[in-house]
Image (cartoon, grey):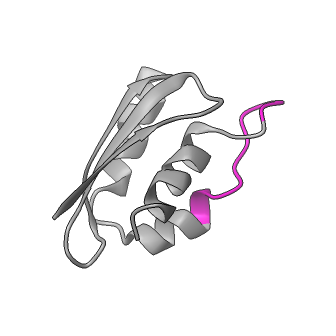
Protein backbone atom coordinates (compact mmCIF):
# COMPACT_ATOMS: atom_id res chain seq x y z
CA UNK A 1 0.00 0.00 0.00
CA UNK A 2 1.09 3.54 -0.66
CA UNK A 3 -0.45 6.82 0.38
CA UNK A 4 -0.38 9.96 -1.76
CA UNK A 5 -0.76 13.34 -0.07
CA UNK A 6 -1.05 15.89 -2.88
CA UNK A 7 -1.41 19.66 -2.43
CA UNK A 8 -3.67 20.86 -5.23
CA UNK A 9 -2.91 23.80 -7.50
CA UNK A 10 -5.54 26.06 -9.06
CA UNK A 11 -8.66 24.49 -7.51
CA UNK A 12 -11.02 25.14 -4.61
CA UNK A 13 -9.89 21.90 -2.99
CA UNK A 14 -6.67 22.16 -0.97
CA UNK A 15 -5.41 18.61 -0.72
CA UNK A 16 -6.05 15.13 -2.10
CA UNK A 17 -5.15 11.99 -0.13
CA UNK A 18 -5.25 8.68 -1.98
CA UNK A 19 -4.38 5.15 -0.87
CA UNK A 20 -3.28 2.70 -3.59
CA UNK A 21 -2.68 -1.02 -3.18
CA UNK A 22 0.39 -2.76 -4.65
CA UNK A 23 -1.41 -3.13 -8.01
CA UNK A 24 -2.26 0.61 -8.20
CA UNK A 25 -5.91 0.00 -7.40
CA UNK A 26 -7.45 2.90 -5.47
CA UNK A 27 -8.46 1.88 -1.94
CA UNK A 28 -9.45 5.26 -0.47
CA UNK A 29 -9.76 8.92 -1.53
CA UNK A 30 -10.18 11.97 0.70
CA UNK A 31 -10.41 15.48 -0.76
CA UNK A 32 -10.10 18.50 1.52
CA UNK A 33 -12.00 21.62 0.48
CA UNK A 34 -13.88 22.09 -2.76
CA UNK A 35 -17.47 21.12 -3.56
CA UNK A 36 -18.15 18.68 -0.72
CA UNK A 37 -21.01 16.67 -2.22
CA UNK A 38 -19.53 16.32 -5.69
CA UNK A 39 -16.10 15.38 -4.39
CA UNK A 40 -17.51 12.88 -1.88
CA UNK A 41 -19.33 11.20 -4.77
CA UNK A 42 -16.23 11.16 -6.98
CA UNK A 43 -14.21 9.72 -4.09
CA UNK A 44 -16.64 6.81 -3.67
CA UNK A 45 -16.72 6.09 -7.40
CA UNK A 46 -12.90 5.91 -7.55
CA UNK A 47 -12.53 3.19 -4.92
CA UNK A 48 -11.66 -0.07 -6.68
CA UNK A 49 -10.56 1.60 -9.93
CA UNK A 50 -7.15 1.22 -11.56
CA UNK A 51 -5.11 4.44 -11.19
CA UNK A 52 -4.03 4.41 -14.86
CA UNK A 53 -7.67 4.25 -15.97
CA UNK A 54 -8.56 7.22 -13.74
CA UNK A 55 -5.65 9.25 -15.14
CA UNK A 56 -6.83 8.50 -18.67
CA UNK A 57 -10.35 9.72 -17.93
CA UNK A 58 -9.63 12.68 -15.60
CA UNK A 59 -6.52 14.24 -17.12
CA UNK A 60 -7.31 17.52 -18.87
CA UNK A 61 -10.76 18.07 -17.35
CA UNK A 62 -11.27 21.80 -16.75
CA UNK A 63 -13.47 23.71 -14.29
CA UNK A 64 -15.01 26.70 -16.06
CA UNK A 65 -12.30 29.13 -17.16
CA UNK A 66 -9.68 27.51 -14.88
CA UNK A 67 -6.83 25.61 -16.50
CA UNK A 68 -7.44 22.64 -14.19
CA UNK A 69 -10.14 21.01 -12.01
CA UNK A 70 -10.40 18.67 -9.04
CA UNK A 71 -10.57 15.62 -11.36
CA UNK A 72 -7.51 16.90 -13.27
CA UNK A 73 -5.68 17.35 -9.96
CA UNK A 74 -6.59 13.77 -8.97
CA UNK A 75 -4.98 12.65 -12.25
CA UNK A 76 -1.87 14.72 -11.45
CA UNK A 77 -1.63 13.18 -7.97
CA UNK A 78 -1.92 9.67 -9.40
CA UNK A 79 0.60 10.34 -12.19
CA UNK A 80 3.16 11.24 -9.54
CA UNK A 81 2.54 7.96 -7.73
CA UNK A 82 2.60 5.34 -10.50
Relative height, residue 50 to residue 70 (above, below): below
Q: Is residue 54 left or right of residue 16?
A: right
Q: Residue 65's spot in the image, x, y percent? A: 84, 30
Q: Which is nearer the eye, 38 or 74?
A: 74
Q: Which is nearer the eye, 41 or 71?
A: 71
Looking at the image, which residue is at 64% across and 38% down?
69
The quadrant holding residue 17 is top left
Q: Is residue 9 left or right of residue 20?
A: right
Q: Residue furthest left?
A: 1
Relative height, residue 38 to residue 29 (above, below): above
Relative height, residue 76 to residue 40 (above, below): below
The quadrant holding residue 33 is top left
| Residue 27 lies within the magenta run | no
Q: Residue 11's spot in the image, x, y percent? A: 61, 28
Q: Residue furthest bottom?
A: 23
Q: Residue 22's spot in the image, x, y percent? A: 20, 75
The quadrant holding residue 51 is bottom left
User: Which range of residues does the magenta coloring cover?
Assistant: 57-66
Magenta residues, dominant SS class: loop
Looking at the image, which residue is at 30% across and 72% down?
24
Count of numbered tags = 0
Looking at the image, which residue is at 36% across and 33% down?
40
Q: Residue 27's spot in the image, x, y percent? A: 21, 58
| Residue 62 lies within the magenta run | yes
Amino acid sequence: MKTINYKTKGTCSREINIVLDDNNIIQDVKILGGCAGNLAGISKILVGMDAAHVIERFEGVRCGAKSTSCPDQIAEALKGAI
